[in-house]
Image: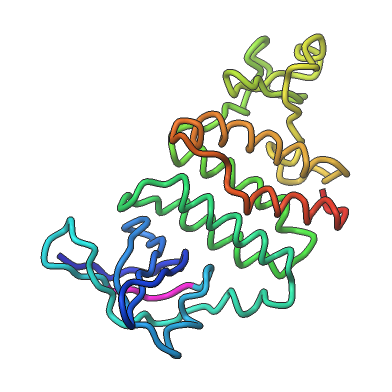
Amino acid sequence: MEWVDDAIVLGARPFGEGKLVAEVFAREHGRFGGVVHAGRKSQPILQSGNVVHAGWKARLSEQLGFYNPLELIEPHATRLLDDPIALAGLSSAVSLIRGATPERQAYPQLYDALIVLIEAMPHTDVWPALYTRFELGLLSALGYGLDLTRCAVTGETENLAWVSPRTGRAATHDAGLPHADVLLRLPPFLIDAEAELKSGDVADAFALSGHFLERRVFEHKGEGMPDQRRRLIERLGFAGRL
């Protein structure tokens, strides 16, 4: 059994003497682990967020398997070393992939979305909002997508401003206003890419995606939300970027 694919490095852990288990998120094969030889050359390649060309093989498909020497394509981790908030964003995104996606199941659209997010991280004013879109994309890829296209009460497609925390369906401002205390805010930029990004919009988007990630994904797995995500939101808040 073997495959070759482009992949995003998720991390690595020790595995016996002189070896590591590298975990990657491959475009056509999903989250996969495999043994690699530890060494000076492999350490910088195996930084989370780097894009590599990976070749995996095993005698049987259910085995852990081995990677051929990973070939570095894009050293994203190195490019973000001087930006601790971007590194926190990268760490959070990787932790969500590791915690939410099942092993060995392909999510090519989610892979592409993660690549777009990582490549946007050098642009300070852009990526926090894009990050929340990535989280909504993760929900959708896992089969828990929200319906933000029309009002669940009136059927209207304009002036959507709220989301039901129970159903994940949108509501117009007027239809949801009597229940504003229990509804989640829907920032305009999540449904209109050209909408002006206002103060508090990113925080509202984090609250929206976080609610459904926790309820529909991590609680079902018997786990809490990754600490990396909480630390990212704290850093963005301290920097005034929510």
Residue 166 % position (x, y): 59, 18
Q: Residue at x 63, y 32 (%)?
A: 211
Colour mapping: rainbow
Q: Is residue 19 above or below residue 190?
A: below
The extreme front residue here reads: 17
Residue 141 vertical position relative to residue 64 in the rendered view, above or below: above
Quadrant for the N terminus in the image: bottom left
Q: How many marks?
A: 0
Residue at 66%, 66% in the rendered image: 87
Please give the range of residues in magenta.
51-55
Q: Give the prevailing secondary structure in the magenta stretch.
A: strand
Q: Note whether 161 is above or below 101 in the view shown.
A: above
| Percent x, y of residue 194 | 76, 46
Q: Is residue 12 within the magenta segment?
A: no
Residue 59 is left or right of residue 137, and the answer is left
Residue 122 percent across, percent down from the top left: 71, 70
Left or right of 86: which side holds 225?
Answer: left
Residue at x 77% of width, y 51% of height: 234
Nearest the eye: 68 or 199: 68
Determine whether, in the image, residue 68 is placed left or right of residue 94: left
Q: Residue at x 82, y 14 (%)?
A: 177
How far across and how far down the image is residue 201, in percent?
80, 40
Farthest residue toward the left? Answer: 59
Query: In this orientation, which residue lies closer to the viewer: 127 or 21?
Result: 21
Q: Quadrant of residue 213?
A: top right
